[in-house]
Amino acid sequence: MVPQFSGIHVAIIMDGNGRWAQARGMARPFGHRAGAQAVRRAVEAARRLGVGTLTLYAFSSDNWKRPGKEVSGLMRLFRAFLAGETARCVENGIRLQVVGRRDRLSMPLLRSIEAAEKATASCTEMRLRVAVDYSARDSLLGAAAMAEGKELSREDFSRLIAIMNHDPLPVRDVDLLIRTGGEQRVSDFLLWEIAYAELLFLPLMWPEFTGGELESALRQYSTRERRFGALLATAATAAAAAG
Ligand code: IPE
Ligand code: IPE
Ligand code: MG
């Protein structure tokens, strides 16, 4: 455990599965299956390194535009992941939450999500949030509609976003956002929560991600000078104010 990372929020855009597979002469689903192994490694390392919240982008609302076969393969993989990982989450004190829309997911997947969330609900060592059918802009639109013109604090608005995402608790702002796969874009992920996040774009493809990569990302993060708009001497106070 590396104490300076205690409790931070790390978010990862897990990109590059398809290219990783194609570079090996394989079909894209092969990359998604290898990506699921990388998720296990990332979760294990995050827990070991003292990360408080890990949010993983697994399927964006725009990913429905992909061929039906790829989408249904991914949905099967999510179910298998939930079935296979829930017990390990409980053992390691990890609370699992799926964030995003739920109305377009199949009944069997919904049941697996609810079972995993229920089984891990009292775990407090780390929060693992898996974003499925997630769009930050849709969450923001939904939260704004719920606010109905009321004047809200940032904390109140974060609570509305949590409701939109089916997350029982609001989250702290993202401290470190990592994207694998070489693209340097956000692709509609956590637009509100990354206001002051440190950004790290890695050239490696998601199936190549290991616990050591996360550790090295966190070390890079720890060398960044976060100022939150203030001067360095007062940045800690400014960080608290930024949420
Ligand atoms: C990320 O990998 C996984 C999902 C978006 C579901 P991609 O499938 O986007 O892989 P590339 O970017 O095409 O290589
Ligand atoms: C972002 O990756 C979504 C996930 C990793 C789940 P995409 O591959 O969908 O993003 P774009 O299309 O390259 O922006
Ligand atoms: Mg991609």
Image (cartoon, rainbow, N blue to C red):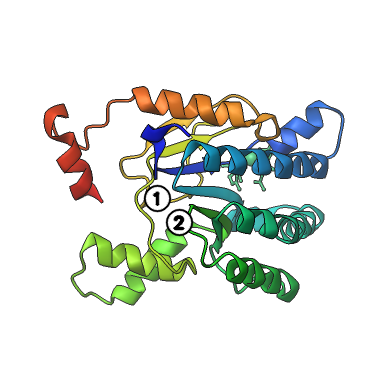
- Report the disc number at residue 74: none
Q: Is residue 198 visible?
A: yes
Which residue occupies 28% across, 77% down?
Answer: 148
In the picture, measured across the screen, residue 182 lies left or right of residue 162, that is: right
From this view, report whether residue 213 is shown above or below residue 120.
above
The answer to the question of whether label 1 and label 2 lie on touching residues, with beta carbons closer than 8 A, is yes
Left or right: 95 as drawn, with respect to 41: left
Q: Horizontal and vertical percent for residue 29?
A: 81, 45
Q: Residue at x 12, y 34 (%)?
A: 234
Q: Quadrant of residue 25?
A: top right
Residue nearest the viewer, comparing 49 with 183: 49
* Local secondary structure at mark 1: loop
Q: Is residue 14 visible?
A: no
**Residue 57's spot in the image, x, y percent?**
57, 49
* Tag 2 secondary structure: helix
Q: Which residue is drawn at the image coordinates 17% and 42% (left, top)?
A: 238
Residue pictured at 27% horizontal, 31% vertical: 226
Q: Quadrant of ligand 3?
A: top right
Q: Quadrant of residue 163?
A: bottom left
Under mark 2, the amino acid is Ala
* Residue 177 vertical position relative to residue 107 in the rendered view, above or below: above
Side (left or right) of 185 relative to 68 = left
- Residue under numbered circle 1: 191
Disc 1 beta carbon < 8 A from ligand 2?
Answer: no
Choose the circle earlier in sequence order: 1 or 2.
Answer: 2
Give coordinates of residue 232: x percent, y percent: 16, 28
Q: Is residue 20 above or below residue 195?
A: above
Picture disc at residue 136: 2
Crowding at label 1, few (<14), some or many (≥20) Cα neighbours within 10 Å? some
Residue type, label 1: Leu
Percent across and percent down for residue 193 are 37, 50
